[in-house]
Each structure stands twice: as C-alpha cells, then as structure tokens.
Amino acid sequence: MKKQWLSMFFILLTTSLIHAEMSNDDIAKASQNPVTMLYSLPIQNNTYFDLGGTGETKNVANFQPVIPMDLSEDWDMVWRLIMPVVSTPVGTQPTNPVSSIPGTDFEQIHALGDSTLTAYLSPKKTDKFIWGAGAALYIPTATDDKIKTDQWGGGVSFVGLSMQERWTYGALVMNVWSFGTDKKYSDTKIDFFQLQPFVNYNMGNGWFLTSVPIITALWDKENKERWTVPLGGGIGKGFKIGKLPVSANAQAFYNVVTPETFGETWQLRLQAQVFFPRK
C-alpha cells in the first residue's frame, strides 16, 4: 500500500514538473500540431449562421480527445476521436448530418451526431517536415432519426506541417466512403472529402494569429450543392490555469462557396484545448 501511494505521488510530482516546464509559447505551438505527442482534450464549438438563406442557425460542439501512443523507437501512433453534439433545425424528412437540408417548417433538435475516429502513424524523428498518415473510421453514433444515417464509413487521412521560427503551417486531408448502409437511408450514402489547411503566426507570450478553414466536398451531390469553402481566421493564446496547460482561440469565417440549398453564410468557431503532457 505504501508503494502505491509513493508511485501515485511520484506520477503527480512528475506531471506537475512537466506542466511547469511548458511555456505559453510551447502550449501555443503544441495546439498547432495535430500529431503532437501530448494527451489533450480539444472542445470546439462551431456556430453556423443563415442556413440556406433561411436565417436559421446550427450549432455543433465537437469533443475531440487526442491519445498518442509509442509504437517503437521510430514510430508513434496518434488517435483522435471527434464526437459532435448537434443543435440544428430540420424539416420533417430524415436527413444526413453531413449534408443536412433544412425544410420550410423547422424543428430544432438536440442530439449526438455521427463520430469520426482517425489514427495517424507518424515518425518520431523528423527534420523540418512533420507528417502523419493513417485511416479514418466513420461511426454511426447519431441519436436522433432526423440526422442519423445508420452507416459505417472508412477512409484515409494525411497530415503534414512545418514549424519554422514563428510560423506553423500545413494541411490535413481526409476522404471517407460508406461501407454499410440501411435501406431506409440508402439515398444518403457517405462520400465526403475534407481539406483543412492551417497557418499560424506566433507573436510571443503564447499569443498567435490563426486560420484553420475546413473545406468540404460532398461527392454524391450536384456541383452547386457540393462544396463549402470558408475564408477567415482569428486569434488565440496558450496559457496556464494553475499548472494546467490550455490553449484557446476564436475564429470567424465567411463562406465564399457554399451549397445553394442547405449551406451556411457565416461560421463562428470557439475552441479550448487542455493538455496532459506525458513523461
């Protein structure tokens, strides 16, 4: 029993020391690296305005735990799970959460959406270019019939970035296809592409300018309903709450390209990320 208490004390002491060693700039840069080897919990809230020109608003809060693993002396694996909590207006017909089309008579629903699990294989030793490649799994976790697909999906994902002096820039690319469908929802097969370019400029003391637009394409839709292309950015900061490293940022985007029927005009993103450094 005494050994267990000593072990727990040592772990807590070591974690506190690691926390203390991270500067605000270190925290900011860690938040800009998708394959950083730190346990973290990003919570990202996205508000979408003027859906389909109706004036309606949708809100999606993504809980995104990140779990890194040491595979060998040369390779790491980084797991990222995205679990969305959705508040959205829908019509009377079941819709795909990836391409939800509001109807004329709105009903506001609040539910868990479908989740996405990605795993990136990344080399431990890198020069100026950091990268990770792996697979994505689309999981039908939606809890409301009006947004569920009852479909599983799979795909590939790649991330690459460079961190040079004050700049961090790169991109994350993913495409997912459905491999399991329900007859009831067979007209909403999952086939979507996501490109997430990012650029950050670190100004010192944890402050940084950031732009992380999420560009999407729904391949099963017609051209005028397929693409969403946001343009914008914001500001963020790395800091500590006690000894706990935290990063937060706010970004706003205008969609220069958006689906005619169901696309939104503006997006507001607020994100906080808590880090749990490893020994």
Image (spheres, helix red, strand yellow):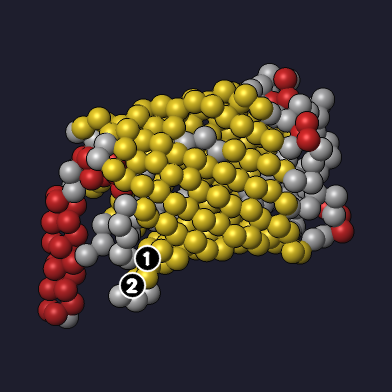
In the rendered structure, find residue 123 and report the number of the disc placed on it.
1
Q: Residue 260 lies in what quarter of the image?
A: top right
* Residue beneath the point at 15% across and 63% down: 14
User: Where does the image place residue 249, in percent across and percent down from the top left?
Assistant: 38, 33
Q: Mark 1 packing: few (<14 Cα in 10 Å), some, or many (20+)?
A: some
151 relative to 148, above or below: below
Q: Nearer the viewer, residue 214 or 12?
A: 214
Q: Is residue 154 visible?
A: yes
User: Where does the image place residue 188, in percent across and percent down from the top left?
Assistant: 80, 49
Q: Nearer the viewer, residue 143 or 125?
A: 125
Q: Residue 24 lies in what quarter of the image?
A: top left
Q: Is residue 16 visible?
A: no
Q: Nearer the viewer, residue 161 or 202?
A: 161
* Residue beneath the point at 64% across and 53% down: 175
Left or right: where 176 falls relative to 65: right
Question: Amino acid under label 2?
Answer: Asp
In the rendered structure, find residue 132 and report the number of the disc placed on it.
none
Question: Amino acid under label 1?
Answer: Pro
Left or right: where 195 falls relative to 257: left
**What residue is pinned by disc 2?**
74
* Residue beneath the point at 25% across and 30% down: 203
The N terminus - image quarter: bottom left
Q: Mark 2 packing: few (<14 Cα in 10 Å), some, or many (20+)?
A: few
Distance between mark 2 and mark 1 Cα atoms: 6 Å
User: Where does the image place residue 118, in percent across and percent down from the top left?
Assistant: 53, 59
Contact? badges 2 and 1 (CB < 8 Å): yes
142 relative to 136, above or below: above
